[in-house]
Image (cartoon, rainbow, N blue to C red):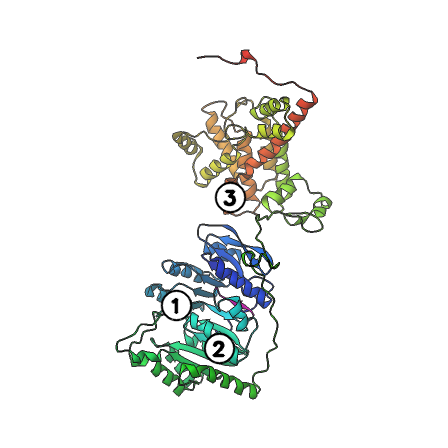
Amino acid sequence: MATGQLFSPTTQALFYNFKQLPIQRMLDFDFLCGRETPSVAGIINPGSEGFQKLFFGQEEIAIPVHSTVEAACAGHPTADVFINFASYRSAAASTMTALKQPTIRVVAIIAEGVPEADTKQLIAYARANNKVVLGPATVGGIQAGAFKIGDTAGTIDNIIQCKLYRPGSVGFVSKSGGMSNEMYNTIARVTDGIYEGIAIGGDVFPGSTLSDHVLRFNNIPQVKMMVVLGELGGRDEYSLVEALKQGKVNKPVVAWVSGTCARLFKSEVQFGHAGAKSGGEMESAQAKNQALSDAGAIVPTSYEGFEVAIKETFEKLVEGGKITAVKEVKPPQIPEDLNTAIKSGKVRAPTHIISTISDDRGEEPCYGGVPMSSIVEQGYGVGDVISLLWFKRSLPRYCTQFIEICIMLCADHGPCVSGAHNTIVTARAGKDLVSSLVSGLLTIGPRFGGAIDDAARYFKDAYDRGLSPYEFVESMKKKGIRVPGIGHRIKRGDNRDKRVELLQKFARTHFPAVKYMEYAVQVETYTLSKSNNLVLNVDGAIGSLFLDLLAGSGMFTKQEIDEIIEIGYLNGLFVLARSIGLIGHTFDQKRLKQPLYRHPWEDVLYTK
């Protein structure tokens, strides 16, 4: 268990199972406290990735969404708090995963009803590894003016009324989240407010105890007194009694254990929390209050006297010079949401597009964070611009040269291929440049120029699984799938595609490794034994070599490489390159003033 502060003004959290309202409340609290950075670093939503748009004051921000706990922790190594909004069915598993991450220090489990056996395992693991668990069945905790968990302290209006936007001198701990909100208000009325407040949770086995936090507060210089709100049931309060008797606490403790009314009922009473059920005289509220009082805590005679006891204790500390007046600050105005403030002029409207590749808001446009002037001054080429806009990073020069070579070699392949033919026919019909270009681009697909991604996907899968060329080709044959990147209508084993040879020569000279290309060549050797036209074509060459580029550069994870292929980056190269040729064919036909094209009768087989 931690011995000092759990949170600070720079604490950041990972939020499991996206819930917009509690996250937005955290961000609004951040803004209210004047934090420079949002307290939510990332969101974990199993099965989902991307970004979630939320507000940080007036500014709309995009918070990364990760599909796994591991990915989120790796992506945000400074986030050390894990806020778990999973249901009681999955809370234990996701919490254990979080606790096993070296970056996570504090976990808050919001769900109630987590199986007790699972909870015990979590508590044991956390204590053995010096980590803190709040909950299960907790609203969380708050450090005034610094950080709060989820819905802790309720609405912004309540937070302002309780002066939680700046630190006070009181450390507060309770089992109940709802009563915590009430006590923050009470404490703010009669003291300078809380410094830190914790709700340990109402389940039978909380991850941390009242005494754990009182002992922490005792070690925090800014905390001058402690307020504890317990409840009947369990024996947690007795650990605090022992700490008081042993002299481990040297600051005033004002305590009250609720549930004294239980004796008015003839039968045993179960209150709201699972743990709020007296199991004997020692677990009664009266017995606990007496034990706390005997140990030295300041215990009123009723809940109504709790506020008075807190006030008197605080005033004695002020009179004794142990507490100096807190400088009051005026918190900033939280912008109203659009649906409630559309007529007031204080609105914030959500954006409709997220862009991570370019920004034109400054003095000059930026590509991937690089200003346009730097791109020109440093002599960046088309390949460098593609690396910034497509891959969001500046790739090594040999990579960008390879991209440029691919574009040059694929720019055109004569007027007879389907794409060029369509563009020529459209241009001769008098259509504009864009229409002519698009008519050619629409022919790109698995049969014409669109097999680069498929070639990369199948070659990678086969190589990574350790399939021999024979096993790969024959397995594709059984599935009824042609091997993408293999085969040509014109080229043969004794008449190789010069473009393929040029790409292979460049890669062997400049790439750190060409394992995927060499595998594709081995596949070609096997397919040529079957038919002389089953050569490695330009799609297969680019697909396999791009795998070597991505893997060999050391700048992409396996997941990123798979995503690049899945999204269609490689086919994008062909589309970009061939657009140059198709535009050229459009201009050529218009310059030559060619008439409307009509296909000759003799080139058509008319049959019934």
Please identify the quadrant where the N terminus is shown: bottom left
Question: Can you tell which quarter of the image residue 417 is in?
Answer: top right
- Kindly report the distance in space between the C-alpha atoms of the residues bearing marks 3 and 2: 54 Å
Assign a secondary structure to mark 1.
Answer: helix
Q: Does the magenta portion include 114?
A: no
Amino acid marked by disc 3: Glu
Q: Residue at x 72, y 44 (%)?
A: 376
- Kindly report the distance in space between the C-alpha atoms of the residues bearing marks 2 and 1: 31 Å
Q: Which residues are magenta?
A: 145-150
Amino acid marked by disc 1: Ile
Question: Looking at the image, is mark 3 or mark 2 earlier in the sequence?
Answer: 2
Question: Looking at the image, is mark 1 or mark 3 earlier in the sequence?
Answer: 1
Q: Which residue is mark 1?
A: 123
Count residues near mark 2 (Cα–Cα under 10 Å), then give few for <14, some for 14-19, many for 20+: some
- Vertical placement of residue 137 versus 229, above or below: above
Q: Which residue is mark 2?
A: 186
> Which one is in front in this view, the residue at disc 3 or the one at disc 2?
2
Question: Looking at the image, is mark 2 or mark 1 earlier in the sequence?
Answer: 1
Question: Can you tell which quarter of the image residue 380 is in?
Answer: top right
Assign a secondary structure to mark 2.
Answer: helix
Q: Nearer the viewer, residue 288 or 208?
A: 288
Mostly what secondary structure, the magenta segment?
A: loop
Relative horizontal placement of residue 85, taking residue 402 as reference (left or right): left
Residue 170 shows in the view: no
Q: Residue at x 37, y 60 (%)?
A: 88
Please identify the quadrant where the C terminus is shown: top left
Amino acid marked by disc 2: Thr
Assign a secondary structure to mark 3.
Answer: helix
Circle 2/circle 1 CB separation < 8 Å: no
Q: Which residue is mark 3?
A: 563
